[in-house]
Amino acid sequence: MSYSVDKSDEQWRAELSAEEFAVLRQAATERPWTGKLLDEKRAGLYTCKACGNELFKAGTKFDSGCGWPSFYESVRPDAVELREDASLGQIRTEVLCAGCGSHLGHVFPDGFGTPTGDRYCMNSIALNFEAE
């Protein structure tokens, strides 16, 4: 897929910390219960740490108990790209930023009690938060 923000690995490394680069550009995962946005409760907007693309409204965030910020839907269907991921010997659905292709996390169909039934399990380090 072609992205509106297209940079080389060298450019991304210059702009992101080593941990941010590992998650956003190499699909690593931050440790559970360590992300600074896990307990964020204010109204606002979550954006991609790499390119600023709008991703999730705070009103769609919920406490799933999984250790990572969870949302039940993206701000717009075209804000994220969903891709099959078989990297751990199981089939999962990877969530990428549609603006730059950065890895954000995975989506699972176990968001019980949410309007969509989905749980977008995102790496806190992959997101910025803009309070209203």
Image: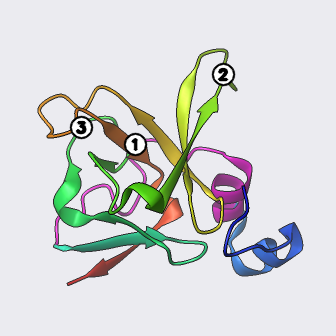
- The residue segment tinted magenta is 19-42
Quarter of the image for the N terminus: give it.
Answer: bottom right
Answer whether labels 1 and 2 touch (C-beta < 8 Å): no
The foreground one among 5 and 52 is 5
Which residue is situated farthest in the top direction here?
A: 89
The reply to whether residue 17 is in sight is: yes
> Which residue corresponds to mark 1?
121
Rendered image: mark on residue 64: 3
Q: Nearer the viewer, residue 44 or 41?
A: 44
Query: Depth check: 15 or 39 in front?
Result: 15
Quadrant housing the C terminus:
bottom left
Q: Earlier in the sequence, mark 2 or mark 3?
A: 3
Image location of residue 10, percent across then percent down:
88, 73
Q: Which sits earlier in the primary sequence, circle 3 or circle 1?
A: 3
Report helix, strand or loop for mark 3. Answer: loop
Label 2, label 3: how far apart the Cα atoms are: 22 Å
Q: In the picture shown, does residue 45 fall above or below 113?
A: below
The 10 Å Cα crowd at callout 3, few under 14, some 14 to 19, many 20 or more, is some
- Contact (CB < 8 A) between labels 3 and 1? yes
Front in this rendered view, residue 98 or 90:
98
Please name the residue shown 37% across and 43% down the image: 120
List the single residue furthest toward the bottom. 132
> Could you tell me how far apart the alpha carbons at marks 3 and 1 are, in whole angstroms?
9 Å
Q: Position of residue 66 (x, y in %)?
A: 33, 35
> Mark 2 falls on what kind of element?
loop
- Residue drawn 51% across the image and 45% down it: 105
Q: Which residue is mark 2?
A: 88
Please name the residue shown 23% across and 54% down the image.
61
